[in-house]
Amino acid sequence: MVKDIVILAAGVGSRLRPLTDDVPKTMVKVNGEAIIERLLKQIDAIDSVTTNIKIASGYKSQILKDFVNSLELKTNIEFIENKDYNTTNNMYSLYLALSAINEKNDLVIINADCFYDKAIVEEIVKSSGNYIAIDKGIFNEESMKIKANDSNRIIGMSKTLEDNEYTFVSIDIYAFDSRNRDKIFQIASDIINSGELNSWTEVAIDLLSKDESSNLKYLDMTGKKWMEIDNHDDLRKAEEIFN
């Protein structure tokens, strides 16, 4: 099995200053280990899947590239630089990355500000199908959320979804087969070509979920450790969780 993996890592991480004054957000360390370092090593350790990684960089791009190259991983890693990272959002970074890939393999998309248990990364990379990883154990207003029907098919994705028995928190890691990969790219292209450069990738995934043929479902990661790190409180929590 061959998979293309796009890691969205262009953001500034202003709420983590001064830690991000000199390095990009994904290089912030949790108990001495950079977020991107942990993620790449987890992917690199999966022997049953051949992975081609595209890192969509932006802020402090050269510093990130030098750091990743110093890890000397066996996985093929390329960088796609979003030079307009200050005025665009991560859908634009995804669009640039997918535009640079000629193959049409299955796709994994990962936001580069999450610190994961290795079991989460391994399960999503090895999966066959179309999945959003979710956690049923938490619910908060800040998190991206998905809405499912009673057949576990995802029918919506938004931060504004209300808490109910079919609404769950996304943990920002997604898998798509080659057919839905093409649909995601087309949706993102249409949005960007309309002049909207400041949308989240999840807007495209929400639109994809409206297509019944997408068969987008969730992978339940409840009980496995993860933490999205947006600010200093998140970083403290991550260090406690992964201590």
Image: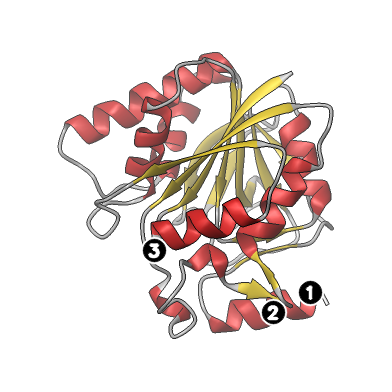
Q: Earlier in the sequence, mark 1 or mark 3?
A: 3
Q: Which mark is residue 237?
A: 2
Q: Quadrant of residue 136?
A: bottom right
2 and 1 marks in contact (CB < 8 Å) = yes
- Seen in the picture, residue 141 relative to 231 is either above or below; the reply is above
Q: Residue at x 66, y 83 (%)?
A: 236
Q: Is residue 177 visible?
A: yes
Q: Nearer the viewer, mark 1 or mark 3?
A: 3
Q: CA distance from mark 2 to mark 1?
A: 6 Å
Q: Nearer the viewer, mark 3 or mark 2?
A: 3
- Seen in the picture, residue 18 relative to 83 is either above or below; the reply is below
Residue 129: image location, x then y, percent:
68, 22
Direction from residue 103 to residue 97 in the image, left or right: left
Q: Which residue is mark 3?
A: 60
- Amino acid residing under circle 2: Lys
Q: CA distance from mark 3 to mark 2?
A: 25 Å
Direction from residue 183 to residue 144 in the image, left or right: right
Q: CA distance from mark 1 to mark 3?
A: 28 Å
Q: Nearer the viewer, residue 198 or 47?
A: 47
Q: Nearer the viewer, residue 33 or 119?
A: 33
